[in-house]
């Protein structure tokens, strides 16, 4: 009698992939530092591949809540 096949589910954290053509760093916080001026989530999302601006906005709000970024209306800055 053979044993039933067991499949493993591997959970990986969501990653924001960085665009190879962009000159901005790979993390949203580092990208804010590199931007040097207040930017919206939509503007910052253009520098990453397969990144939803709404998801990036949530990350930026989290950084602001942790005190690692500042919010000025819809714009974020470090």
Image: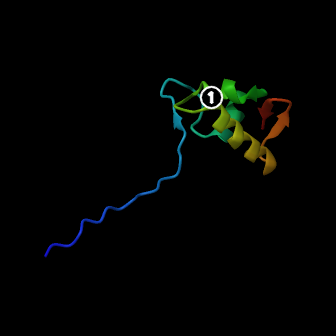
Which quadrant: the N terminus? Answer: bottom left
Would you say 62 lies left or right of 13 here? Answer: right
Give the camera-side residue of 6 and 13. Answer: 6
Q: Residue lying farthest left? A: 1
Q: Position of residue 33 (x, y in %)?
A: 71, 35
Q: Position of residue 9 (x, y in %)?
A: 39, 59
The picture quadrant where one finds residue 44 is top right
Up/down of 61 relative to 24, above or below? below
Q: Position of residue 23 (x, y in %)?
A: 57, 26
Q: Residue lying farthest bottom? A: 1
Residue at 83% from the left image edge and 36% from the top image edge: 71
Residue at 78% from the left image edge and 33% from the top image edge: 76
- Determine which residue is flagged by label 1: 45
Up/down of 49 relative to 65, above or below? above
Would you say 33 lies left or right of 11 here? Answer: right
Give the camera-side residue of 57 and 76. Answer: 57
Give the camera-side residue of 3 and 27. Answer: 3
Would you say 24 lies left or right of 3 here? Answer: right
The picture quadrant where one finds residue 55 is top right
């Amino acid at each position: 009698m053979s044993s039933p096949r067991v499949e493993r589910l591997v959970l990986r954290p969501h990653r924001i992939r960085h665009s190879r053509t962009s000159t901005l760093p790979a993390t949203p916080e580092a990208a804010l530092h590199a931007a040097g001026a207040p930017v919206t989530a939509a503007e910052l999302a253009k520098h990453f591949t397969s990144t939803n601006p709404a998801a990036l906005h949530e990350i930026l709000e989290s950084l602001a809540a942790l005190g690692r970024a500042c919010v000025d209306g819809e714009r974020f800055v470090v």
